[in-house]
Amino acid sequence: MYAFDHLVHLVHDPKKAMEALRKCGIQAVEGGSHSDWGTFNTLCYFDLSYIEYLGVENPAVAEKARDNPLVHQALEDLAHGEGPARIALRTDNLEEASRLLEEQGWRMNGPFPGRRIRPDGSVLRWTLMFPEWPDGELPPPFLIQWEQTDEERRRDLQLRKAMMPHPAGDLRLKHIAFTVQNLGRAAEWEKGFGLRPGKEYVDMELNAVCRELKLMGGHLLFCAPIGDGPVQRILQKRGERPFLVSFSGAERDEDWSILGGIYRLIRDP
């Protein structure tokens, strides 16, 4: 029912984010403005999976749009610094997906019709729903249904040259990793969103135990600290949030620190 759609990475200036990405060989394009929400973005594509660099363009409008949970989170999180914030899952049946989550005890907030005015003046439309889990610090995935089909979007993005080659290699989104207090978070999402369990292992570099959930377009990785290390420090600073993006297909293995997040480029075997 779901595919990975995008990671929201909150930044103060999305256009400056493009410059930071170029330094590590990742190309991004201007997205445009969400005039109803007071936000704007730049976008970085890996086929239909992408990263959205979202900032507040008009604080007065954004304050009035706080009923949208993503706008509310942007205002709150950016007051403490930049960084990856939450993910979106794509569905072609938003109503049915929402009904199934509600049957499991999730509260649903929405729908929120969305539109973005692109630099050429054209308008892109979609609808969002926000599941809420009562005792979770980690913001759960929000759901998105696009006005276009996947093939229509892919063709449109290719024609607009939004899907650009990346100098760092033939990059494909591999994992989005989250800091969590314990791996129970993975179990909540596995059940709620019907995701397939993957491997569980200890990452010595992160000093964390990690559990994978498999998802078309990019897997999810939940990392709980087992002692002092990057995961524990990020957890103490930002709470339960996405913190690391890994890509396969890179020309060489590299880690980059970009605007509050870790970007890991990995060569194929």
Image: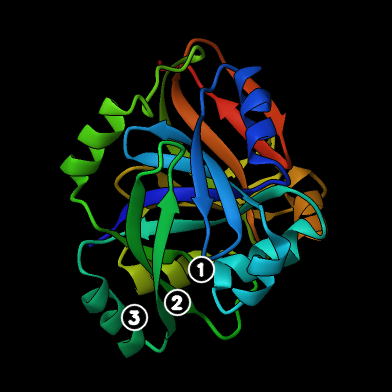
Image quadrant where residue 259 sits: top right
Mark 2 surroundings: few (<14), some (14-19) or many (≥20) residues within 10 A: many
Residue 98: percent from left, percent from top: 31, 79
As drawn, 72 above or below 109? above
Dot placed on the residue nearer the N-terminal end, 1 or 2: 2
Dot placed on the residue nearer the N-terminal end, 3 or 1: 3
Estimate the spatial distance between the alpha carbons at disc 1 and disc 2, rounded to whole Å: 7 Å
Evaluate if marks 3 and 2 touch, with contact meaning CB atoms under 8 Å apart: yes
170, 17: nearer the viewer = 17
Left or right of 200, for residue 224:
right
Q: Quadrant of the N terminus?
A: bottom left
| Residue found at x 56% / y 16% | 25
| Residue found at x 59% / y 29% | 264
Evaluate if marks 3 and 1 touch, with contact meaning CB atoms under 8 Å apart: no
Disc sitting over residue 131 in the figure: 2
Mark 3 or mark 2, whichever is nearer to me: 2
* Amino acid at the residue labelled 3: Leu
Left or right of 14, for residue 3:
left
Evaluate if marks 1 and 2 touch, with contact meaning CB atoms under 8 Å apart: yes
| Residue found at x 61% / y 60% | 38
Estimate the spatial distance between the alpha carbons at disc 3 and disc 1, rounded to whole Å: 12 Å
Image quadrant where residue 253 sits: top right
As drawn, 88 above or below 65? above
In the rendered image, is residue 125 in sight? yes
Q: Which residue is mark 1?
A: 140
34, 145: nearer the viewer = 34
Image quadrant where residue 155 sits: top left
| Residue found at x 18% / y 42% | 152
Estimate the spatial distance between the alpha carbons at disc 3 and disc 2, rounded to whole Å: 8 Å
